[in-house]
Amino acid sequence: MLEARPIVVNPDGVIIGGNMRYKACKAAGLKEAPVYFATWGEAKEREFTIKDNTSAGEHDFDVLANEWDATELNQWGLNVWDPQEEEQEKEEKPKCELCGK
């Protein structure tokens, strides 16, 4: 598995993909593991981090809501709140004929 999906690290040595593989390696007592050193820009790193964890990863939705763009997250396959959809839903709700609400 490690050769097929190495741990992905940015130039600062921060794991941007494979943190659970890294933990498993440590728990197994491994001293070495395959690592891919990514030299992407910040935008590509952020996209990779989301895409790498979309199918099975855990997310801190408070951080995502406050520090990430919902449209980008949705484009990358992580279905989150979309403010445009909420506005559309508000517009589509029928109004009360008596009170106008």
Image (spheres, rainbow, N blue to C red):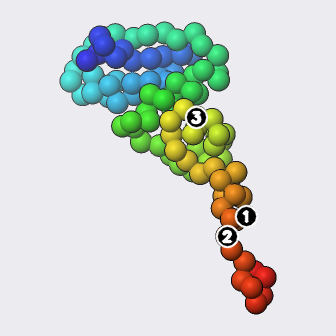
Residue 78: give x, y in percent of width and height: 51, 40
In the image, 59 versus 85, the foreground residue is: 85
Give the label, 3 or 1, closer to the camera. 1
Question: Exactly how many numbered labels are in the figure?
Answer: 3
Mark 2 residue element: loop
Mark 3 residue element: helix
Question: Which label belongs to residue 93?
Answer: 2
Q: Residues within 10 Å of mark 1 (few under 14, many from 20)?
A: few
**What amino acid does circle 1 point to?**
Glu
Mark 1 residue element: helix
Residue at the disc numbered 1: 91
Does residue 33 appear anywhere in the picture?
A: no
Indicate whether 98 appears above or below 73.
below
Q: Residues within 10 Å of mark 2 (few under 14, many from 20)?
A: few
Q: Residues within 10 Å of mark 3 (few under 14, many from 20)?
A: few
**Separation of residues labelled 2 and 1 (CA atoms):** 6 Å
In the image, 20 versus 92, the foreground residue is: 92
